Image (cartoon, grey):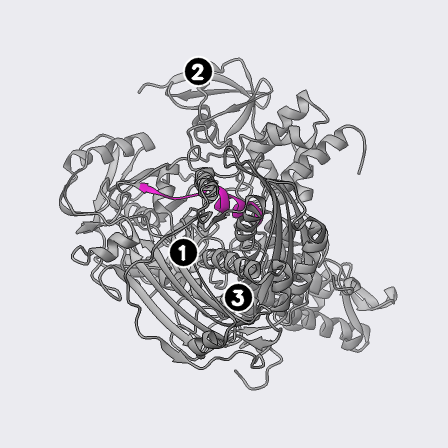
Amino acid sequence: MPKTLLRLRVNGEDYDVAAAPHKTLLEVLREEMGLTGTKHGCELGECGTCTVLVDGEPVLSCLALPVELEGRAITTVEGMAPPGRLHPLQQAFAELGAAQCGYCTPGILLTADALLARNPRPTRDEVRHALAGNLCRCTGYTKILDAVELAALRAGGDRV
Amino acid sequence: MIDDKDRFSIVGRPLPKVDAWAKVTGDTKFADDLALPRMAFGKLLRSPHPHARIARIDTARARALPGVYGVITGADLPRVKFGILPVSQDEEALCTEKVRMVGDAVAAVAAVDEETAERATELIDVEYEVLPPLMSIEESLAHPEVRIHEYGDGPNVHKAVSLQFGDVEAAFSRADLVREDVFYFEGNTHLPMEQHAAVAQWGADGKLTLWSSTQTPHYVHRLLAKILDLPAAHVRVIATPVGGGFGGKLDLFAHEIVACRLAQLTGRPVKFALTREEVFYVHRGRHPVLMWVRTGVTKTGEILGMHFKTWLDGGAYGSYGVASTFYTGALQTVTYKVPAYKFEGARVFTNKPPCGPKRGHGTPQPRFALECHLDKIAEQLGFDPAEMRRRILAEPFTKTANHLTVTTIGLGECLDRVLEASGWPAKRGALRPGRGIGVACSSYLTGAGTAIYWNDMPHSGVILRADRSGGVAILCGAIDIGQGSDSILAYLVAEVLGIEPKDIRVHPADTDLTPVDLGAYSSRVTLMCGNAAIQAAERLRAMLFRAVAAKLGVPEGDLVARGRRVGVAGDPEKSVSFAEAVVLAESANGVLAVPGSYAPPKRAGKYKGGGVGPSPCYSYSACVVELDVDRETGEVVIRDVWIAHDVGRALNPLLVEGQVEGSVYMGIGEALMEEQVFRKGVHKFPSMLEYKSPTTLETPEIHTILVETDDPEGPFGAKEAGQGPLLPVIPAIANAIHDAVGVRIDEVPITPDKILVALERQRQGKAPRVGPERLPLFTFPAPRMVESAFGQPADNIAVRPFDDRRTDGG
């Protein structure tokens, strides 16, 4: 199938990429742009692993088509924080052991980022509901919930 | 907890993992993140039939497709069967004569991209002669005229074992109560978030490199050499960080072998990345097991004798199945006093994906049965089930009936702590209708005491290289699968050398560069690699002390290594920086590269089968679950889980808690929803949506209590944490459901439909139970009679084959 030239805005930078129009955002990010921080768990929209942000909203990149996303702001795990720095969620996940194998982590971080953007101090139940579409097989979710709460607390100015 | 924290500067602290930063930024490179120039993409053609003879394979149309670099069948590989265990060499990478399950690979393609490779597989013509499929234990035993394999202990029987330790019948005749129960545990799968992937590269020098998401690079290395008929010295296996294993990446798989052969034939690197559906068929997960148990007890609940039978649905191949079979009988004796014990087990072939090791390997099924069975005994005798367990706990530093040496046992403290934390005494019998509370205990290995292939070499090796910069490199064959093995290695070496984990780089799992570690299985890595790392670090520290003592003119015995300095304790004048100490030692000794080795104490029982079960030490867990059962819908909502785990010593409490929480979560999934089941040979739901697993919403608050016993076998006293805590969760849930609504679901998973059937039976005045009603017609071999070793003193405590302190040269 002939490739289409696309201009995508990812992590604040414009990328010109050529990809077949049926290629998913997941495939284009990983295979055409070398942004392998976005992972895949099912490629059927079932596990949340491939979550990225489009204009700040969580989107399953395995179900999204880049041809429809030109001009939109796409954020992957590589773009969560300025170069050389960590996003408060990344910091909290690292400190609390919320990433074990780390494979589901990018998708969960971005989903949590979107949650905190619209609800800076969520209850534990609200965190549970926001992350209900992201499967993790390692952690039992406990440290993930703790880390999101810690990041929210710190963003609120209460250092712990 | 042990009150000797001042001994340590790193151990016991809740530090971040050394790879935490890479993991939260997406920097970690998993196997499918690798890309090499000119790389081709591979695809397997898999059988659509559960059982069929292969009459003809024609690859001509696939070869003719533009963009296809290579197409192979079994005829393009050496005709050699393989399997992870030497006793079960029954697999082919690409089947040549017969397929035994839906998903068996028959041909493979390498092409310019994934889509072309997939299209090419569709152009391969395979003619099958369909054979009758055998889809259950009962079917396989009832149809000896249909043979899945030509080997084994009987028609469609892979393995049958029978062992007796002491006179079980005499024990039953003395008992005040003899109770029998039957249980069934449905199989389930690991469901790691990362699908298996591998990249193979065949160098112009004729040497092969394979990068793979594997838990056992060493076994992959050995087997690849055999299967591809290459000198092992020309094969290099590099394990990439594993995105979840749980036992599912412990075998050698078709895609790994075929990637290598296609790389050789096409002259290009070849990548295979399995789809989620393929991962369900690759499987090697939890065996479905049917179980029968008879126990004789005194009127106070002491066990006099136990007889346990298991029938395992093994699926189409051997895999680790012989070990799994023994494991369904091995650890019943490690938790409670069982003076006389008989075990009979049989693993049956069926035309389903092969089962193998999943977290707890062969022991969660009998643990579910045993702990529910004990609850029923306690109820029958009128005892609080927790109190009865408390009275019959195994004795530390003794042998079990089946000759296993147990060392420290923190189970009494575990039980006391969860009972207290959960408010058990007040809640027991006092909760509102529909709410229930249940308890269970368990134990698990800290590393298999014997290797998969018999040898006298170390099970784990570490090389430390100290650099003039003051940095230290750890080379070790272990691979981090999320459990934190890289971090544990760094913490232990940093502790001994008095430096920070950040000063250390861990180089894992590269068969060209790292000494062998047998793999991430049987909860062995922290103990075995940890002991090897401590040995290497102590040897290096001795060299540093010698050099620094000479320089400072002080006795070596006065020196300590702490805070990145080596010197006399409490005298900053008489010390040098760690980097200076390295320079002094390198000046005196030459290059500082120091090995450490570990092999477990030799304790295999002197009977056939005695090699499965021994371990340097055993972890212990106790769990209380509180839950609600909806009588109208049969739905179970877990409120709280309290779990106490005897981890020997928590080298990093944060990581141990993470292992315990993950185990509890996985146990909840197995107890209530996860099942790997088939319809007409086809998986009923090979997708993450329909294969139910717990989300954040089904996972309750988990209250983790760590108990420390400072085991003499462990690195600084540590035992395992990654598998054991799963074990008590499933029976604690089953027991809590009984407490809530008075029904017994003797079959896992406990789904709402089963609870509703049992509640209906309760309403009708029938036995309020759902579970297996009958056992297969099967005659086990005559038991091997072995004297019970129950109560004998433990032997070979902390006697390690490669220990510097040994003087007998062993």
Which residue lies at the image location 69% right of the left edge and 62% below the top edge?
B413
Q: Nearer the viewer, residue B605 or B503?
A: B605
Q: Is label 2 on the same chain as label 3?
A: no
Residue at numbered disc 2: A67
Q: Is residue A81 visible?
A: no
From the top left corner, tell me how far across and down residue B267 is, in percent. Answer: 29, 44
Q: Considering the numbered disc 3 on the image, is that residue within a helix, a strand or a loop? A: strand
Which residue lies at the image location 58% right of the left edge and 41% below the top edge?
B23
- Residue type, label 3: Gly
- Residue type, label 1: Arg
Q: Which mark is residue B236?
A: 1
Structural crowding at the residue carrying mark 1, measured as other residues with C-alpha within 10 Å and reported as few (<14), some (14–19) or many (≥20): many
Q: Is residue B532 visible?
A: yes
Q: Which mark is residue B257?
A: none
From the top left corner, tell me how far across and down residue B226 is, in percent. Answer: 30, 61
Q: Find residue B451 and report its image quarter.
A: bottom left
Q: Is residue B246 magenta?
A: no
Task: Report how far apart the C-alphas of labels 2 and 3 lie in the structure.
Answer: 51 Å
- The magenta segment is B664-678
Task: Report how far apart the C-alphas of labels 1 and 3 lie in the structure.
Answer: 17 Å
